[in-house]
């Protein structure tokens, strides 16, 4: 029997739960369990011989995860404790994976600075600043200026100048802290090396130019 929709699963589950079974108070939309007991078939003349049953469902599944007979009430309680503990672990794992996906997804926040190094016979350095987050995967960036120092003939070092915008906003798809600027260049997040008086300091980048 295929349970193709939620209504079918709910109906099948209801039919699987024995009449008179008690719903475990720890049950929720994540999973639920029921308990019941019956006199043993071998307890003729001995009403003390009881068989304990437990049935559990994962999420909205129609078919039970298990439907067991237990030797004692303590055995059943242990099994149900483990079941509800596994539900809690599953929730925590999903939350952790969601955070990991978020962290390893866009990987950028407003105010982050990106650096792009490109060129063939020369090394061009461009800086960008994240000015807005769009959805879960995109960012708005703007090119920013740089503080430049010449260390030799047609070469030197530069550091970004956040807030000094020299370009129009661009919307880019971001992943793991990087964006594609053009077919020949990408830009990656810079990590500040220090912060002085509220100003983030960045490591300098080497640049060179044509004669």
Image (cartoon, helix red, strand yellow):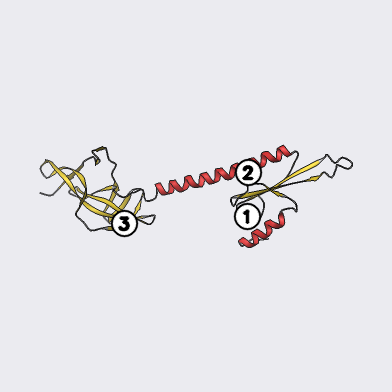
Identify the image quadrant of residue 135.
bottom left
Q: SS for tag 2?
A: helix
The residue indicated by pointer 1 is: 61
First in sequence: mark 1 vs mark 2: 1
**Above or below, comparing residue 2 to residue 20 in the picture:** below
Camera-side residue: 152 or 149?
149
Q: Position of residue 68 (x, y in %)?
A: 72, 45
Res. 96 in view: yes
**Above or below, comparing residue 171 to residue 44 in the picture:** below
Q: Residues within 10 Å of mark 2 (few under 14, many from 20)?
A: many
First in sequence: mark 3 vs mark 1: 1
Camera-side residue: 11 or 157?
11
Q: SS for tag 3?
A: strand
Camera-side residue: 113 or 131?
131
Q: SS for tag 1?
A: loop
Q: Residues within 10 Å of mark 1 (few under 14, many from 20)?
A: some
The residue indicated by pointer 2 is: 83
Q: Residue furthest right?
A: 45
Mark in the foreground, 2 or 3: 2
Res. 119 in view: no
Identify the image quadrant of residue 86.
top right
x 37%, y 55%: residue: 137
- Per the model, the C-alpha gap separating discs 2 and 3 is 45 Å
Q: Position of residue 157 (x, y in %)?
A: 17, 42
Q: Quadrant of the N terminus?
A: bottom right
x 23%, y 58%: residue: 168
Q: Is residue 152 left or right of residue 105?
A: left
x 65%, y 62%: residue: 8
Q: Residue furthest front?
A: 25
The residue indicated by pointer 3 is: 172
Q: Is residue 39 left or right of residue 147?
A: right
- Residue 203 disc label: none
């Amino acid at each position: 029997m295929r349970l193709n929709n939620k209504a079918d699963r709910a109906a099948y589950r209801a039919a699987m739960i024995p009449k008179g079974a008690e719903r475990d108070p720890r049950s929720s939309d994540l999973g639920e369990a029921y308990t019941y007991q019956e006199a043993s078939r071998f307890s003729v003349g001995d009403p003390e011989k009881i068989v304990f049953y437990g049935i559990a469902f994962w999420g909205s599944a129609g078919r039970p995860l298990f439907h067991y007979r237990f030797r004692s009430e303590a055995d059943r309680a242990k099994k149900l404790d483990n079941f509800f503990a596994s539900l809690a672990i599953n929730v925590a794992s999903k939350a952790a994976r969601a955070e990991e996906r978020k962290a390893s997804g866009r990987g950028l926040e407003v105010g982050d600075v990106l650096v792009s190094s490109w060129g063939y016979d020369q090394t061009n350095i461009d800086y960008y600043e994240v000015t807005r987050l769009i959805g879960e995967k995109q960012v708005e960036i703007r090119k920013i200026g740089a503080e430049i120092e010449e260390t030799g003939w047609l070469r030197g070092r530069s550091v970004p100048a956040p807030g000094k915008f020299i370009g129009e906003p661009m919307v880019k798809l971001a992943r793991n802290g990087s964006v594609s600027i053009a077919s020949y260049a990408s830009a990656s997040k810079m990590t500040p090396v220090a912060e002085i008086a509220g100003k983030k300091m960045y490591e300098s980048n080497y640049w060179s130019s044509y004669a």
